[in-house]
Image: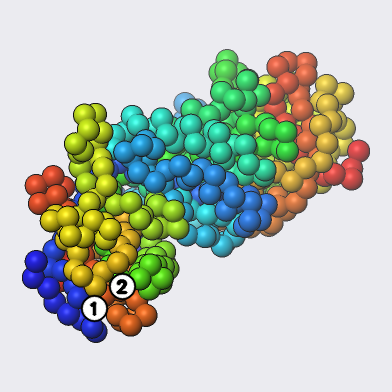
Amino acid sequence: MSQLTVNGVRVDDTFAEAFGMRATALTITAHNGAWARQAAFTMTGFATSVIGCGCEAGIDRALDPDETPDGRPGIRVLIFAVSTSELQKQLQNRVSQCVLTSPGSACYAALEAEDKLKLGNALRFFGDGWQLSKRLGDKHFWRVPVMDGEFVCDALTGLSKTAVGGGNIIVMGATPETTLAATELAVRAIAAMPDVIMPFPGGIARSGSKVGSKYKGVMASTNDAYCPTLRGSGKSALDSDIASVLEIVIDGLTSPAVAAAMRAGVHAILELGPERGALRIGAGNYGGKLGPHHYHLRDLLP
Amino acid sequence: MNALIFTLRDAPPQRLDLAPLTPDRLLGLSESKIAAIELQTTRERLCTGDIFKIRMGDPMQIRFDGGSERFDRAGAGMSKGEVTIDGDVGIQAGRMMQGGKLTISGNAGPWAASCMKGGTLAISGHAGDRIGGPLPGETVGMRGGVVTVCGDAGMRAGDRMRRGMLIIEGKAGAYPGSRMIAGTLIMQGRAGPLPGYLMSRGTIVMVNGSDALSPTFSDSGVYEFVANALIASYVQTYSPKVAMMLRRPWRRLLGDMAVIGKGEIFYPPAAN
């Protein structure tokens, strides 16, 4: 594979291949930022990959009280799924089990779109007839009595059909420590970008996967070409100086948001340089035939 | 483009029906056609040109220079644009209004905003009885939009209200929110006796309490409601001083238990 070198870091001349997804955004508020974050963490837990979790979800950013509908501290979360029906199911289950249950929480639509998903309209039945509808202008809320007061929720939330899932950066380094340092830096840079999430633990995946397996019925399996311990097996994509590989996966509400996030991550890694960080960066794709969105690393360089 | 201005020549000799003088109905009409529109409510024919001096302008912005207690049905049925009346109006101002903005700088008579569906109505003075309410025979009153009264309102404000927001910055007469089906009624001044009489659902906020509460409302305690913060941010543009009052703990009274009892009155925590 041809490569460029920027600030001593080798950059593969390749691209990340991403897919169209359905997505929505929510604002979760609570009495204080800690409880808003707790509800958001719980709701976006076990949502790393659509392969096994049904959806991919994560925290976009923290919101100040003056940015939320009820004037309390909040967290904006994004949820992505492969179909509208799966997204509706995941949204309903996760908000009802993780946000409705969290002390002092309220949940609002955080995405304006023509298409809608049911939010409070699905959860209101928990009120067993005691739920209250409140329309304020073009907004419609449900108030559901709960044991610490009321759970307030938007009736509907926006549905984006132009969201993108699967933007990625593959970070390769000489040691696990330097590779992790570079990847963590990139995660922090991407976390500051709007409208994107990194659904894996702490934003980082160490078990990048390829499509298919030698075993029947297994959809995805280890990305053996990027496993350093398999270097020498004949299929490796790794150079002799690479001993650790990590991946950042990025989902975004729009394609430009994913591109901007990848750029921020790439810049952070390149700026750190090879001594304390990564020796090489690459990106995952399937030959360009499966996903409509291609993010070429050479277009994202400083 | 300047506003289309109707300047009152003299006090009207009879009650007038101003419903034809809305942006919806004047759009595309010439001055002579507007002047020929009949406004009488008796057998004596009276045309717009007899009552008003007309200065042509954008029919989406209509202004009445001078008002009268005899100006009935001002802005009735309007769905867009702005109508401003510099003075008083009679009965049924903004009745069945669907959109746009109606501004009255003086007082309004009974049944202002009657059965209103949308838009905004702002009354700088006082409002008469049954603001937002239905006429006899109708089953549902106000069902959308926002009404602000800077002064006082008469009795039965928000009668049979189903949806929308009715804000009274002054005092309200007896039975405010009577037979409410849903919607939100906020009164900053003290309300007359028996608020929420036979209300089934909906929200009544009484910043300064009322003269007498119905025994068919039950106390459910003092709480700070997240929903009130949402109401506050919504009413901020219409009545900043009312919005400021909402973000605090309220005593919640449930009722009217004489009917289904799913309505609520937010009452000052300390008051009885």
Query: Label 1: chain?
Result: A
- The location of residue A14, given as percent across then percent down, is 13, 63
As rendered, which of B42 and B202 lies closer to the eye?
Answer: B202
Task: Give the residue displayed 51% in from the left and 33% down from the top.
Answer: A120
The numbered dot on residue A99 is: none
Disc 1: which residue: A9
Q: Is residue A269 above or below residue A50?
A: below
> Judging from the image, what secondary structure is the residue with disc 1 in?
strand
Identified at 30% across, 62% down, the residue is: A245
Q: Which residue is mark 2?
A: A174
Answer with left or right where residue A149 lies relative to residue A299.
Answer: right
Name the quadrant of the C terminus of chain B: top right
Foreground of the two, A187 or B22: A187
- Contact, CB < 8 Å: mark 2 with mark 1? no
Categorize mark 2 by other alpha carbons within 10 Å: few (<14), some (14-19), many (20+).
Answer: many
**Three-letter amino acid code at disc 1?**
Val
Q: Output the chain of dot 2.
A: A
Q: Earlier in the sequence, mark 2 or mark 1?
A: 1
| Side of A215 relative to B25 (left or right) | left
Q: Quadrant of the N terminus of chain B?
A: bottom left
Where residue B232 appears, x then y in whole percent?
Answer: 63, 50
Query: Is label 2 on the same chain as label 1?
Result: yes
Q: Residue at x 37, y 40 (%)?
A: A55
Q: Quadrant of residue A179?
A: bottom left
Residue B21 percent coordinates (x, y): 40, 42
Please tell me how many numbered marks the rendered image carries: 2
The answer to whether residue B54 is above or below residue A220 is below
Question: Residue type at mark 2?
Answer: Ala
Pinpoint residue A17: horizontal percent, then vertical percent: 18, 53
